[in-house]
């Protein structure tokens, strides 16, 4: 019997039982101090230029030039102050909204950029950075939406990687043969759905472990596309693998908004389709008959069965649809970016998409933000590499994966996947 | 109607007629085939023979959807509700009122719930999440679900298994109301008391066959013998306890789950040598976690557990077993046995590494077989061979294997969670006798049970748990009503006072052990006395 428990009333006792959530304050403090020491106190001489405007904007915003060390110092002090606030709130067991980590992240990144740009006299092209982030996010977002629809219906889809690759392949080939990028866009979802057909056939009909089929399918698609690439496509690239690019369709007025207008509304149709898919899913998953039944099948299939919902049919249909979404995402690698098909060009993005889905807690909105975060970190790596910073290239290229590991490992908080995901429904 | 699973005939040419507006009870033991039959009726399984007639019209169900369309509603034993849905969503599922584009008309869905809910005084908020509702309310959601589809025949599968006695009473009055409004009810149960309270006609089913009709006026003993097929004693014979020292003590035990919810909240109690403390309560009020913390599967956040003066907190499960704890887990099939292992192997799961069963790296096969045969004899286990996988045994015999393992050593403490869940009446009798024999040999025993009959059959004292706390520790002669109130969270003194007018004698008797235990706790530490005083406020 310790003295502490003798004095404690039941109410106070139960409160003291919730351990203080130190995880975030510790991370904030470390990042704040890193910023203060390296970007502020040690710092770098020289000035950093943030280039915001691009030619042809509605009105021009001048470049912002800041002294690297002073900017680093000021921003670091803000970071340390935010860390202190988070410690204070944690000790009082009060939670902060999700804007806090976002704001902290933005300030930290700006502080880092100020440091990275200084010394080398570098110019940080903000618009390019953001445009790159969006471009790199597109396949991730499509992939995450695919995973989300599948898992909400109860089918784990590890084969997103394969679906992206298959989509990229078929889009490139069809677009090249027909000599029209839009034809490729129509073909891509079919490729993704075909992969999903195999997945659901084994998962639903033969109750094979879904993770294993998913992995096997990825290997299969890599093998198949690589084989066709090196035999058929390279034989006659003019016919089979000529570049076709979806044209940009700037939306009037919206695309003239400084910074974001350029990034968001001067894009090809695939990106606009992505906006529609995310918004539609956000509404329909939670508020439509289709969404309700899909979630019921993924959470408690037997309950769905007892009200006359065909569980396996619903699962198959939704997973095929999800496969089509991932196939569209794959098209972004080829016709979306105006590139020819290359071996294994999806490069693991399907797995990162899965991570984005988990980080986004199986919500379209959350998965979107997570995918954007991953895309941004990759774009940041690319930009820094191109302007030349004191940080080693290899480390910069690791950035998106480090972000992914941390994000998925510990910072999601309590996540609850659909209860029946991965469990075959057997009557 | 006939339903066959492999070579096992679950329903053998069953005939059943339900009249409009009657409550028809289907009585049978666990595994008698009641639920199978209802699942066939509801279209979840296909019948292998026979037909279903509604108003003399033959109907054929290819799925539950057809059954619902024909006016059959079913409340399953395990609720068919999605925990993350709201009440309105759960009721709407499958029959969603929609607006444009397939968006759900939530206002309409809510209206339906409120309408039915107010018609029967269910008091259900259509926007509440299912997982936040107590089981009684979840069951009412299930009933609303069935009624919202105009069910004329309502099948209730073991509806009272998860309810407190008070909730059971409420359910019975709901059933009466439904009956008055013309709904036929098929009520599946193995609880004799409820059948007699509500049924208009009773069909008894045994091993997949109908063994007879019974009238609601039959005595419980008559019903029981019809259900089991032989005369059974419903009460367990036992002498009064002769308690010794309180060698097992739990103080201020607090356990939190992964999501930081407090599941065992500042629990303190003693168990004396030679007595059985039954822990009663509705499923999910912390009993499971308490038992698992005592054996060491979970570490407590606060508090101590001491056996024979030695604190067990922080010790490994193996050390605790070594200290003489015998533990019968709640879920036999996942925690009690390893289904693929042989019976003799299952008998030594906790002592496999010790003499005489093991020497060095070797298991001594002949010794293990010999010992297993002795236990089979002693515990009357019906089996082919001790080297057969335990999965080949019936539930009752599996449980006997578990008991033979746990009671086969010299124990200093015996804990059993739901020791007779899913067993037939014969096996229940046997298990109860063995537990009482263990008590008489001087072992302190803890029995966690949600079945009040079992609690009354075994307990020398009864601790009632509600939402992680022990509401009170009362004598074994406390009335059913008082226990029911306590299971709903009413403190012991109030519960006893509330029921005292009905059973004054019982209350006075029960009050005494309560005070003794409170004094005892106060002597051991001041805090628990303060806590219990606060609880009574």
Image (spheres, coloured by chain):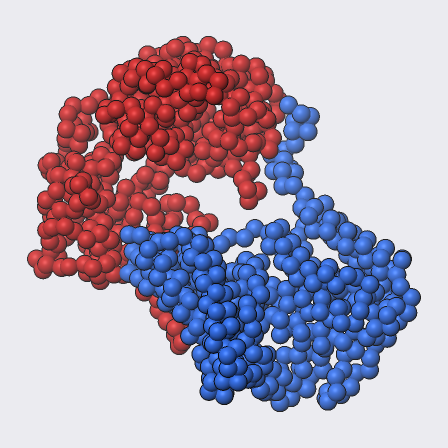
Chain colours: A blue, B red
Residue B518 in view of the camera = no
The relative height of residue B511 versus residue A28 in the rendered view (above or below) is above
Q: Position of residue A181 (x, y in %)?
A: 51, 85
Determine the residue positioned at 85% across, 63% down: A72
Question: Could you say which is closer to the camera, residue B79 or residue A113?
Answer: A113
Q: How many marks?
A: 0
Residue closest to the eye, B39 or B320: B320
Quadrant of the drawing holding the C terminus of chain B: top right
Q: Residue at x 51, y 72 (%)?
A: A230
Q: Is residue A31 above or below residue A2?
A: below
Asked whether A74 or A54 is in front, the reply is A54
- Kindly tell me whether residue B335 is visible in this rendering: yes
Give the image quarter of residue B389.
Answer: top left
Which residue shows up at 31% across the image and 30% down it? Answer: B390
Q: At 16% across and 51% down in the image, what residue appears?
A: B47
Q: Which quadrant of the view contains residue A388?
A: bottom right
Q: Quadrant of residue B104?
A: bottom left
**Whole-percent x and y of residue A385?**
75, 68
Q: Please provide percent x and percent y for residue A337.
A: 59, 79
Does residue A182 sit above or below B296 in this rendering? below
Q: Nearer the viewer, residue B156 or A287?
A: A287
Give the farthest residue toward the right. Answer: A45
- Relative to B201, residue B274 above or below: above
In the visual, does A211 lie left or right of A14?
left
């Amino acid at each position: 019997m310790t003295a502490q428990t003798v004095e404690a009333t039941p109410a106070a006792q139960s409160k003291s039982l919730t351990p203080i959530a130190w995880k975030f304050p510790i991370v904030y403090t470390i990042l704040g101090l890193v910023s203060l020491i390296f970007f502020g106190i040690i710092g770098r001489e020289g000035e950093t230029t943030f280039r915001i405007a691009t030619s042809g904007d509605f009105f021009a915003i001048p470049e912002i030039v800041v002294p690297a060390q002073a900017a680093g110092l000021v921003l670091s002090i803000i970071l340390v102050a935010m860390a202190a606030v988070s410690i204070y709130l944690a000790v009082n067991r009060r939670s902060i909204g999700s804007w806090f980590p976002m704001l902290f992240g933005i300030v930290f990144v700006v502080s880092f950029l100020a440091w990275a740009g200084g010394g080398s006299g570098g110019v940080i092209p903000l618009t390019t950075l953001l445009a790159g982030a969006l471009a790199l996010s597109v396949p991730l977002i499509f992939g995450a939406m695919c995973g989300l629809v599948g898992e909400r219906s109860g089918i784990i889809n590890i084969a997103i990687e394969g679906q992206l690759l298959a989509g990229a392949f078929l889009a490139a080939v069809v677009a090249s043969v027909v000599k029209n990028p839009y034809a490729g866009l129509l073909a891509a979802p079919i490729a993704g759905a075909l992969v999903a057909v195999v997945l659901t056939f084994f998962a639903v009909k033969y109750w094979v472990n879904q993770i294993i089929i998913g992995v096997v399918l990825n290997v299969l698609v890599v093998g198949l596309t690589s084989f066709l690439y090196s035999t058929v496509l390279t034989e006659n690239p003019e016919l089979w693998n000529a570049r076709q690019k979806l044209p940009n369709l700037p939306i009037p007025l919206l695309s003239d908004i400084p910074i974001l207008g350029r990034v968001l509304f001067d894009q090809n149709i695939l990106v606009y389709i992505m906006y529609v898919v995310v918004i539609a899913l956000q509404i329909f998953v939670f508020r439509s008959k289709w969404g309700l039944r899909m979630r019921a099948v993924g959470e408690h299939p037997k309950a769905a069965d007892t009200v006359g919902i065909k569980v396996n049919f619903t699962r198959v249909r939704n997973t095929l649809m999800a496969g089509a979404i991932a196939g569209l995402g794959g098209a972004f690698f080829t016709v979306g970016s105006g590139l020819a098909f290359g071996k294994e060009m999806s490069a693991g993005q399907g797995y990162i998409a899965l991570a984005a889905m988990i980080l986004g807690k199986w919500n379209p909105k959350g998965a979107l933000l997570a995918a954007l975060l991953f895309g941004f970190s990759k774009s940041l790596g690319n930009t820094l590499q191109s302007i030349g910073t004191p940080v080693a290239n290899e480390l910069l290229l690791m950035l998106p994966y480090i972000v992914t590991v941390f994000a998925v490992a510990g910072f999601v908080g309590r996540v609850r996947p659909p209860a029946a995901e991965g469990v075959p429904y057997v009557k | 109607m006939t339903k066959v699973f492999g070579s096992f005939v679950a329903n053998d040419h069953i005939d059943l007629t339900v009249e409009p507006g009657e409550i028809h009870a289907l009585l049978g033991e666990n595994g008698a085939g009641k639920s199978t039959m209802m699942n066939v009726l509801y279209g979840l399984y296909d019948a292998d023979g026979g037909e279903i007639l509604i108003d003399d019209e033959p109907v054929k169900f290819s799925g539950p959807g057809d059954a619902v369309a024909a006016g059959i509603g079913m409340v399953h034993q395990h609720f068919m509700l999605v925990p993350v849905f709201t009440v309105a969503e759960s009721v709407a599922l499958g029959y969603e009122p929609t607006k444009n584009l397939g968006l759900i008309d939530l206002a309409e869905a809510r209206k339906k719930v409120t309408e039915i809910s107010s018609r029967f005084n269910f008091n259900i908020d259509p926007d509440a999440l299912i997982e936040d509702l107590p089981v009684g309310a979840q069951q009412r959601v299930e009933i609303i679900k069935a009624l919202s589809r105009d069910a004329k025949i309502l099948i209730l599968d073991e509806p009272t298994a998860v309810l407190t006695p008070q909730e059971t009473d409420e359910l019975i009055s709901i059933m009466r109301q439904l009956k008055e409004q013309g709904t036929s009810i098929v009520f599946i149960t193995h609880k004799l008391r409820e059948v007699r309270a509500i049924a208009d006609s009773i069909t008894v089913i045994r091993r997949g066959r109908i063994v007879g009709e019974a009238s609601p006026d039959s005595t419980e003993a008559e019903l029981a013998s019809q259900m089991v097929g032989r005369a059974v004693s419903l009460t367990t014979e036992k002498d009064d306890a002769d308690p010794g020292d309180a060698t097992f003590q739990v103080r201020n035990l607090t356990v939190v789950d992964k999501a930081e919810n407090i599941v065992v909240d500042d629990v303190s109690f003693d168990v004396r040598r030679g007595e059985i403390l039954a822990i009663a309560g509705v499923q999910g009020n912390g009993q499971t976690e308490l038992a698992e913390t005592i054996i060491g599967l979970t570490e407590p956040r606060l508090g101590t557990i001491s056996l024979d003066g030695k604190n067990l907190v922080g010790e490994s499960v193996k050390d605790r077993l070594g200290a003489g704890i015998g533990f019968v887990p709640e879920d036999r099939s996942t925690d009690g046995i390893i289904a693929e292992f042989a019976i003799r192997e299952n008998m030594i799961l906790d002592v496999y590494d010790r003499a005489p069963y093991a020497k060095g790296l070797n298991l001594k096969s002949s010794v293990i077989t010999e010992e297993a045969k002795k236990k089979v004899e002693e515990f009357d286990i019906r089996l082919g061979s001790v080297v057969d996988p335990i999965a080949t045994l019936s539930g009752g015999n599996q449980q006997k294997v578990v008991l033979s393992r746990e009671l086969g050593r010299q124990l200093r403490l015996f804990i059993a969670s739901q020791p007779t869940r899913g067993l037939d009446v014969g096996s229940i009798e046997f298990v109860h006798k063995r537990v009482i024999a263990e008590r008489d040999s001087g072992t302190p025993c803890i029995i966690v049970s949600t079945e009040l009959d079992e609690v009354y059959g075994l307990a020398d004292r009864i601790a009632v748990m509600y939402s992680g706390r022990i509401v009170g520790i009362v004598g074994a002669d406390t009335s059913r009503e008082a226990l029911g109130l306590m299971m709903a969270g009413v403190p012991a003194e109030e519960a006893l006072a509330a029921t005292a007018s009905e059973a004054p004698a019982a209350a006075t008797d029960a009050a005494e052990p309560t005070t003794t235990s409170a004094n005892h706790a106060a002597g051991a530490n001041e805090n628990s006395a303060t806590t219990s005083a606060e609880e009574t406020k």
